[in-house]
Image: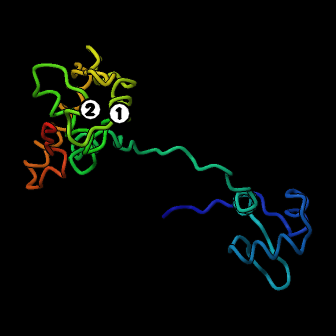
Amino acid sequence: MTQLSIDTIYTAAEAAERLRLTNRGVIKLAKTYGLCSRRGRDYLFSESDVLALWEVLREPAKSPKPATVKIAPAGDWMKANFWLFPPSVSVDRREMAVLRFLSSQRGPRSCKQINRAGPRTVESFLKHGFVEERARDAEGNPMIVITDKGREQIGKADRLIKERGKHGKGSGGWDRQVKQAK
């Protein structure tokens, strides 16, 4: 049989003095949380009751506690499911088609020789380093060829297309082709 040990017992006035509250406040709080004993009109508090009341009075933390369980980084999930999202390329589907066309050409081409590629597209490609200028045509338009950086963009889109195919999905328009202008 275990023996019950009772530590120091306090009256409501003594507990209130220790917690720096009013008698009425301590009794109300203790009754709310079941942290007191009662004999007639007298409320009695053990040492553990007073400590429990102190814990009730504690202010909650303003910021959440750090997680104790390690959470798998989102990066692992993203690596496995990257095919669900557009590729991380700097071009859209139309521009990707223009890059694909340029990668299939042996010589430099001007925007006049590429369907769906105007001067702004060529400027953007030059600015990003996807193409380089080799010469100018008779009208003064730059003649461009694709660079390794442009081929990287195509490679990223191709990896996405391949992964989407493994999951039974289409290319999402990233495999469009443009033709040479007439």
Image vertical order of residue 139 relative to residue 17, above or below: above
The residue pinned by badge 1 equals: 119
Q: Is residue 172 above or below residue 114?
A: below
Q: Nearer the viewer, residue 117 or 157?
A: 117
For this orientation, the residue located farthest to the front is 138
Left or right, 116 with reference to 70: left
Q: How many marks?
A: 2
Question: Residue at horizontal 91%, vertical 59%?
Answer: 17
Residue topped by disc 2: 111
Residue 112: give x, y in percent of width and height.
24, 33
Q: Residue at x 25, y 22 (%)?
A: 144
Q: Secondary structure at mark 2?
A: helix
Question: Are the residues tagged 2 and 1 within 8 Å (C-beta)?
Answer: yes
Determine the CA span between mark 2 and mark 1: 6 Å
Of pointers 2 and 1, the one earlier in the residue sequence: 2
**Amino acid type indicated by mark 1:** Pro
Dot 2 alpha-carbon crowd within 10 angstroms: few under 14, some 14 to 19, many 20 or more: many
Which amino acid lies under the numbered mark 2 shown in the image of this protein? Cys
**Percent position (x, y) of residue 172?**
18, 52
